[in-house]
Image: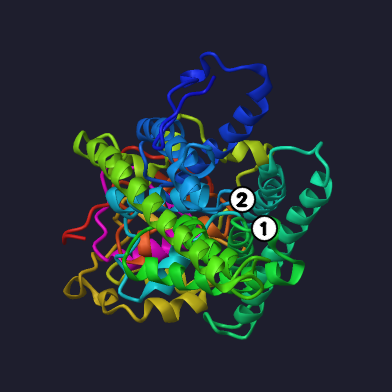
């Protein structure tokens, strides 16, 4: 027999004594616990130590979440006894995971160069764009499909009278919530409300996800159109938190805080307003009490999560176990930690042939070689580089390259990409002008579809030098290791 207090359970720890009849319930809660931990992984992407990932995953899924789940769904839980209602984990899963993500990003800090630009948040976002929108779409499709089971399975049974109809309602309402959030933000992006008019896929996808989160608390008690309205309001909540997080210089690559923390809080409010027993359709007094209980529950869940995660991440940071080194981050965690390249060129172009090259006529041995090469095939880039006063010589901070320099930069016949023809000498190149060096590397890497971004070759924010270039796009246009080639700058970045 299960024993528990109002705060936590006392039996079945580590599954000891668990009966077969509750294995299905255990598995469903196992998925919820795993979801709470994996949401955090998106917020700490690209700089979190894998050891820290193992630690926080175990503590969040094995301690932080189970306590909250006991409060919310156990017959002995204090929130449930108080009158708190949460059908599919709007507060217990999403709000809690969003709060974990917020604490984790604050303790971990931003990725190198994330907020170094003075051009504003929009430029920062562009500089750190994901490498594959198709993969983002596939991931979004998997999340949306999982949401249907996530919410539909929260009933816990499907053999009772009326269960099938209720499950169908939950699934349909989940779809409508996502539709409301996605459609509103899609139209807003096309109208130019968040920048140049465009059909923004990434914004629309996250808005659809927060729309689904927005209905989880009362999805079993909503109609189709009220679910749509709940998701509709969830879209602006996502956008507002997205920009607020950037304004506070909190680096959340996957917008886990905006989607899950924002969606969790709004979802609890929306359920108290738009459900059949909410403020609009139900008894005002009872709906008001339910809203108050949900707000108390949201505050308790947020406080518990922030407290436990602050202790956990604080200890990891104090022991220097939370974040990888700058060298490992710039090299890429797949290469530096796992020793497995995520996107090896041989996997997608096994018959790659080195193209024939043609040297560009560079006659001056005193003027900057950069200007001659970049202007030869890329007139659009010439105007960008002309903005830098440092192209005039040492007075501007740029070290002039000449024919006797160990590296001469050339272009090939195809205007699609630049190449670097190495006059190999094992002496480092000193490049003082950071923006020119970084723009050059971005052009030749990106145009060749070589994922140098994942190797952290990208010029962190187009202003910081490509520090410790272990990887470099050379004349073969392949990202290869060049341990002995190190670019240095004279001033502090």
Of helix, strand and loop, which one carries label 1? helix
Q: Position of residue 391 (x, y in %)?
A: 29, 75
- Please name the residue that numbered disc 2 is placed on: 87
Q: Residue at x 62, y 64 (%)?
A: 211
Judge left or right: residue 216 versus residue 305: right
Q: Residue at x 31, y 67 (%)?
A: 248
Magenta highlight range: 418-444
Contact, mark 1 vs mark 2 (Cβ under 8 Å): yes
Residue 244 vs 77, above or below: the answer is below
Judge left or right: residue 182 versus residue 291: right
- The quarter of the picture where the C terminus appears is bottom left
- The quarter of the picture where the N terminus appears is top right
**471 within the magenta span:** no
Q: Residue at x 38, y 66 (%)?
A: 245
Of helix, strand and loop, which one carries label 2? loop
Judge left or right: residue 440 versus residue 349: left
Q: Residue at x 61, y 75 (%)?
A: 185
């Amino acid at each position: 027999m299960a024993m528990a207090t109002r705060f936590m359970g006392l039996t079945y720890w580590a599954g000891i004594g668990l009966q077969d009849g509750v294995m299905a319930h255990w598995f469903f809660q196992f998925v919820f616990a795993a979801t709470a931990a994996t949401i955090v992984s998106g917020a700490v992407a690209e700089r979190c130590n894998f050891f820290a990932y193992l630690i926080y995953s175990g503590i969040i899924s094995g301690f932080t979440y189970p306590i909250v789940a006991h409060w919310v769904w156990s017959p002995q839980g204090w929130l449930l006894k108080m009158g708190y209602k949460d059908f599919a984990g709007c507060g217990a899963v999403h709000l809690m995971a969003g709060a974990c993500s917020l604490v984790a990003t604050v303790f971990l800090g931003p990725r190198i160069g994330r907020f170094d630009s003075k051009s504003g948040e929009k430029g920062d976002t562009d500089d750190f764009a994901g490498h594959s929108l198709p993969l983002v779409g596939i991931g979004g499709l998997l999340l949306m499909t999982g949401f249907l089971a996530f919410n539909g399975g929260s009933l816990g049974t499907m053999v009772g009278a009326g269960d099938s109809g209720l499950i169908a309602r939950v699934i349909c309402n989940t779809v409508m919530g996502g539709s409301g959030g996605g459609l509103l933000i899609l139209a807003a992006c096309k109208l130019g409300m968040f920048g140049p008019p465009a059909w923004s896929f990434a914004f629309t996808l996250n808005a659809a996800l927060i729309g689904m989160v927005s209905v989880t608390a009362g999805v079993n008690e909503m109609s189709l159109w009220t679910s749509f309205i709940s998701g509709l309001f969830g879209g602006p909540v996502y956008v507002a938190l997205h920009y607020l997080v950037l304004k506070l210089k909190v680096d959340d690559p996957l917008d886990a805080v905006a989607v899950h923390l924002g969606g969790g809080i709004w979802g609890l409010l929306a359920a108290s307003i738009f459900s059949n027993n909410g403020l609009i359709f139900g008894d005002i007094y009872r709906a008001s009490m339910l809203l108050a209980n949900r707000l108390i529950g949201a505050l308790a869940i947020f406080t518990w999560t922030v407290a436990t995660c602050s202790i956990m991440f604080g200890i990891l940071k104090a022991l220097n176990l939370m974040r990888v080194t700058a060298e490992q981050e710039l090299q890429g965690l797949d290469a530096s930690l796992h020793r497995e390249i995520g996107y090896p060129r041989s996997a997608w172009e096994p018959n790659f042939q080195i193209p024939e090259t043609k040297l560009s006529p560079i006659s001056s041995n005193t003027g900057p070689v950069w200007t001659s090469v970049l202007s030869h095939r890329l007139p659009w880039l010439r105007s960008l580089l002309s903005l830098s006063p440092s192209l005039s010589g040492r007075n501007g901070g740029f070290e002039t390259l000449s024919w006797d320099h160990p590296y001469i930069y050339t272009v090939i016949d195809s205007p699609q990409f630049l190449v670097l023809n190495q006059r190999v000498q094992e002496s480092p190149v000193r490049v003082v002008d950071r923006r020119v060096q970084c723009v050059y590397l971005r052009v030749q890497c990106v145009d060749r579809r070589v994922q140098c971004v994942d190797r952290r070759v990208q010029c962190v924010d187009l202003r910081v030098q490509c520090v410790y270039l272990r990887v470099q796009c050379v004349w073969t246009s392949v990202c290869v290791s060049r341990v002995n080639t190190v670019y240095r700058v004279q001033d502090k970045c």
